[in-house]
Amino acid sequence: MRRLITRPILSLLKTAGWELRKALPVGERRLLEYKKRMRDSWGCLKEYHPGTVLDIGANEGQFAGLIREFLPGAKIVSFEPLKSCFETLQSKQAELAPSLAFHTALGSEPGTATINRSAFTPSSSLLPMGSLHKVELPHTAESVQEEIVISRLDDILNDLELEEPILMKIDVQGFEEQVLLGAEQTLQKVIAVVVEVSAQPLYEGEPGFDRIYEIMKSHGFAYCGNVDQWRNKKSGHILQFDCLFENRNLRPQS
């Protein structure tokens, strides 16, 4: 029989300094813990005081929702090629405001292409999924093809007036180099970039850290460590990590 705590006993416990909390279901508790970890990891981006955040590879707006918590006034400009994900992202524009969303992938040249739409949409890529990815994350292996539009970031932003400083986040599953090659003018105005890079090749032909570092360094950026990293829950292997680069032309070292 469940033992009940009466009001007098409850008052005594509170007076003695006890804090009683309702037990949360495991799934809900884990979600809260995950959100706290994400806020702790990504909260460092507040120090750049961005007027604009470029969310490249927005999916359904997960990063935009996170960044909105600690950057309430920054304008979020999102880019997402998958139709269903973009529709979800669009439905969140009011709660993400001020915000703007473009239904396109970004690359080095404008055009159309076929993307491999994974059953787990954040794993979708313009590149074929590698065998390691399928082994480490089998729930992502199944995919269908979807026709998408590719644009150059420089072309899109050429017609927009964005408040600086500008912060850029790139999460495009192996297509990072092409995004950066189409953003050479934009990078001159960006104070910091967070790029997701694979620890080992997860997609065929994707650039590694060395190549991304080389590109960023050529534009005056310095590597400042990792904001976050993603491990396989079962094996513990680090699969991807989010690299932070600062524009030394806009933020000189002290």
Image (spheres, rainbow, N blue to C red):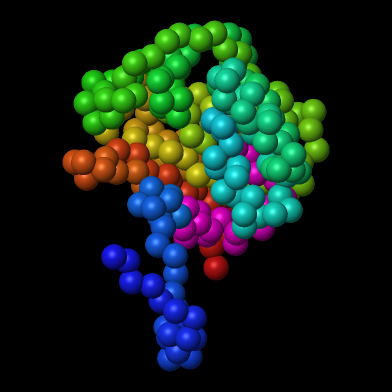
Location of residue 79 by image quarter:
top right
Location of residue 169 by image quarter:
top right
Of all residues, the one furthest to the left in this rendering is 235
**Where in the figure is residue 50, as x and y percent of width and height?**
67, 52
In the rendered image, is residue 187 in sight?
Answer: no
Q: In this figure, what is the number of numbered marks?
A: 0
Residue drawn at the location 27% of the way across and 33% of the way down: 200
In this view, 136 is above or below 2:
above
Return the residue nearer the eye: 231 or 52: 231
Quarter of the image that includes the C terminus? bottom right
Residue 157: within the magenta? no
Return the residue nearer the eye: 185 or 112: 112
In this view, 53 is above or below 72:
above
Q: Which residues are magenta?
A: 35-55
In this view, 103 is above or below 200:
above
Residue drawn at the location 47% of the way across and 86% of the way down: 8
Residue 53: within the magenta? yes
**Where in the figure is residue 75, as x and y percent of width and height?**
72, 44
